[in-house]
Amino acid sequence: MLEHNFTSILMQDEEVKFVQGVDKRAYTIKKTISNMIMVLIADIFVSQFVTVFGNMFTMGDLGFMAWPITFGIVLLLGMPVAYLFASLSANNTFFCITDKRIILKYGVFNFKFIDYSIRNIGTTSVQGSVFDTQGEHASANLVIVTKNFHNDTNSKEAHTAVKVISLVDAYY
């Protein structure tokens, strides 16, 4: 049913074993929260920029009122956009296991694929959160860590990991 999401990147001799989407409700909530945090951080910088440059060009007549007004306007415009991007991302995120590799497809406007060879998979773990659905089709975060590792910026060994947020039926 969902295999059509991966037909463009599957090899000819590759057999699909499992395809699943994400729990749209849980994924949207989690992504909206992280997107809103980014909106708030950007909002602070935009408001500060408008206040400083507005006062420079008006010789201080703009006063401090530009900051809360700008903050409110950017917040009112940014929050629905944060929710919209999270919702679109939830509708376009899929996970596929074939006989040769594990593939994650995600994106809003242009799709990205992450794939790992089955031979390179080191560990997998499932982590639930308060937003994940419980019951018959329980969802959770699926974390796949590869055997191969690299050194991070602090010269510590760091494994490459892919995290599938709110994978439906993650416990089955």
Image (cartoon, grey):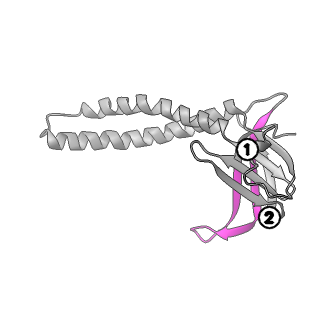
Q: Which label lies toward us, 1 or 2?
A: 1
Residue under label 2: 120
- Which element type, helix, strand or loop, lies under badge 1? helix
Residue under label 1: 5
Q: Residues within 10 Å of mark 2 (few under 14, many from 20)?
A: few
Callout 1, which amino acid? Asn
Between marks 1 and 2, how big is the CA–CA gap? 23 Å
Residue at 67% across, 30% down: 25
Residue at 79% across, 43% down: 3
Asked if residue 114 is positioned above or below residue 20 in the image, the reply reads below
Residue at 36% across, 29% down: 73
Tally of numbered discs: 2
Q: 155 or 94, which lies in front?
A: 94
Q: Name the N-terminal-most of marks 1 and 2.
A: 1
Q: Main secondary structure of the magenta part?
A: strand
Q: Residues within 10 Å of mark 1 (few under 14, many from 20)?
A: some
- Which element type, helix, strand or loop, lies under badge 2? helix
Residue 71 locus on image (x, y percent): 35, 33
Which image quarter is the N terminus in?
top right
Callout 2, which amino acid? Asn
Magenta range is: 138-163
Using the image, tell me which numbered label, if any, was put on residue 122.
Answer: none
Residue 40 locus on image (x, y percent): 44, 38
Q: In the displayed structure, does residue 85 sit left or right of residue 137?
A: left
